[in-house]
Image (cartoon, rainbow, N blue to C red):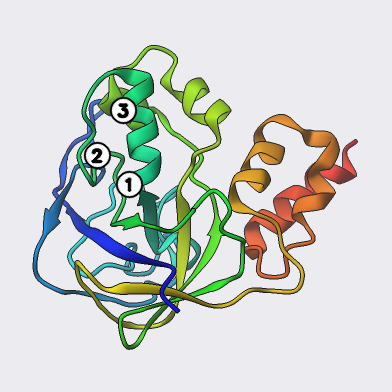
Amino acid sequence: MTDGKVLSVNVGVARPNPAKRFGGNTGIDKLPVEHAVDVRAPGPKTTGLHSGVVGDPIGDVKHHGGDDQAVYAYSREDYDWWEAVLGRPLANGWFGENLTTEGLDLNATRIGEIWRIGDTLELQPTFGRVPCMTFQAKMGEKKWLKRFAEAARTGAYLRVLTPGPLQVGDPIEVVHRPARSIGVSEAFDIYMHRSEDLARILEAEALPTGLREELEHRLSRR
């Protein structure tokens, strides 16, 4: 059964980062492409291939990319919500996502479930997107980081379980839902605003190791 589809595939163009005082590039500016792109696990965050999408640049390799943030997905439905709130059009790829979805509720997506896209590609949601100053600079909206975080319409970072091609129109099927998990939006909201509930996030069996260690450290200090 199809749960959604790939509405847009977006690949970045390296540009000077407007949020960096001392230079450096960013790959947040992503443009839709009509051809299939190859997706594979990029390896460790700082030393691997960085993005899971072949040809997609990442500027800040300390905080972005790597196996647990190999691909970023955002839904057209959440874009439509933001368009109504902001009173401006938002094109697919504007938030810097590689994959714009349609028909799939990313806010209810659970950490650790498995998506099959097309015939072979399998991706697994790991967490929501924590907004950064590069995102703020691109949007040009007052208090954008706070507004984005409060809405908790974060999209989903994904790890690559099975490599394969990604193309516009591919069906997205959720083929596995883990027994122990939490929704991406709920986990993000707890992480940002409800520290008393941090242990709830740790119930997700497929939580990234680094994030699990961070949460355990935060809990140990309480």
Question: Looking at the image, is mark 3 or mark 2 nearer the viewer?
Answer: 3
Q: Amino acid at mark 3?
A: Glu
Numbered tag placed on residue 76 in the rendering: 1
Q: Residue 79's image quarter?
A: top left
Marks 2 and 1 sit apart, C-alpha to C-alpha, by 11 Å
Q: Residue 10's image quarter?
A: bottom left
Q: Amino acid at mark 2?
A: Trp
Q: Amino acid at mark 1?
A: Arg
Q: Are marks 1 and 3 in contact (CB under 8 Å)?
A: no
Which element is circle 3 on? helix
Residue at the image point whose x is 62% and y is 43% from the top: 188
x%, y% of residue 23?
A: 22, 31
Q: Is residue 181 visible?
A: yes
Q: Are marks 3 and 2 in contact (CB under 8 Å)?
A: no
Residue at the image point whose x is 33% and y is 16% from the top: 141
For marks 3 and 2, the one nearer the N-term is 3
Which element is circle 1 on? helix
Position of residue 92 relative to residue 170, above or below, is above
Q: In the image, is 55 to the left or to the right of 130?
A: left
Q: Residue 139's image quarter?
A: top left
For marks 1 and 3, the one nearer the N-term is 1
Numbered tag placed on residue 83 in the rendering: 3
Q: In the image, is 82 to the left or to the right of 44?
A: left
x%, y% of residue 175?
A: 53, 80
Q: Are marks 2 and 1 in contact (CB under 8 Å)?
A: no
Q: Quadrant of the C terminus?
A: top right
Position of residue 142 relative to residue 116, above or below, is above
For marks 2 and 1, the one nearer the N-term is 1
Q: In the image, is 208 to the left or to the right of 199?
A: left
Numbered tag placed on residue 94 in the rendering: 2
Residue at the image point whose x is 47% and y is 28% from the top: 148
x%, y% of residue 220?
A: 89, 45
